[in-house]
Image (cartoon, rainbow, N blue to C red):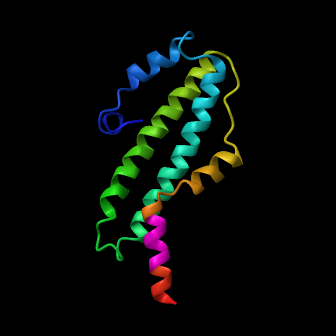
């Protein structure tokens, strides 16, 4: 998902791409669903880390946090469209796996990790 999708998401175009069985097979649909779950977790963690790092960065981390929040909104919409397409194709909706959540947690952006570590070192 690029910057353009974040600020101007076209749900109709995305749904048309999902409807095309030649472009998006049932297996690809399942993989897309898992990818969206992973990215939602990662962006949510990035948002939280940016808020937590705001005092340390004098508020500079709030801009990426706002962007992460926008991404979560778009990813939720995409995930819902994928689930609707699964129901339309009469295939089971993929369940959210613990692995998706764990990998998403590990994908917290490095600058936030560094800021968090620096904050902890100052407190010790």
> Which residue is nearer to you in this view: 94 or 124?
124
Image quadrant in which you'd find residue 16: top left
Image quadrant in which you'd find residue 112: bottom left
The percent position of residue 97, horizontal first and vertical second, equals 70, 43
What secondary structure characterizes most of the magenta part? Answer: helix
In the rendered image of this protein, does residue 15 appear above or below residue 60? above
Q: Residue furthest bottom?
A: 124
In the rendered image of this protein, does residue 114 appear above or below residue 36? below
Left or right, 61 with reference to 78: left
Count of picture labels: 0
Query: Is 115 colored magenta in this rendering?
Result: yes
Q: Residue at x 33, y 72 (%)?
A: 57
Which residues, given as a range, are shown in magenta?
112-118
Query: Is 19 colored magenta in this rendering?
Result: no
The percent position of residue 41, horizontal first and vertical second, equals 55, 50
Q: Residue at x 45, y 79 (%)?
A: 119
Q: Residue at x 40, y 51 (%)?
A: 68
In the rendered image of this protein, does residue 115 appear above or below residue 123? above
* Quarter of the image that includes the N terminus: top left
The percent position of residue 52, horizontal first and vertical second, equals 43, 70
Q: Residue at x 35, y 50 (%)?
A: 67
The percent position of residue 107, horizontal first and vertical second, equals 54, 53
């Amino acid at each position: 998902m690029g910057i353009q999708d974040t600020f101007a998401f076209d749900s109709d175009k995305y749904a048309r791409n999902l409807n095309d069985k030649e472009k998006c097979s049932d297996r690809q649909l399942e993989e897309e669903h898992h990818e969206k779950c992973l990215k939602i977790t990662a962006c949510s963690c990035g948002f939280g880390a940016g808020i937590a790092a705001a005092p340390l960065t004098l508020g500079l981390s709030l801009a990426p946090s706002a962007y992460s929040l926008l991404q979560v909104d778009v990813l939720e919409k995409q995930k819902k469209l994928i689930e609707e397409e699964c129901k339309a194709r009469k295939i089971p909706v993929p369940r959210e796996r613990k692995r998706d959540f764990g990998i998403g947690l590990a994908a917290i952006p490095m600058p936030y990790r560094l800021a968090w570590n620096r904050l902890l070192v100052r407190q010790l």
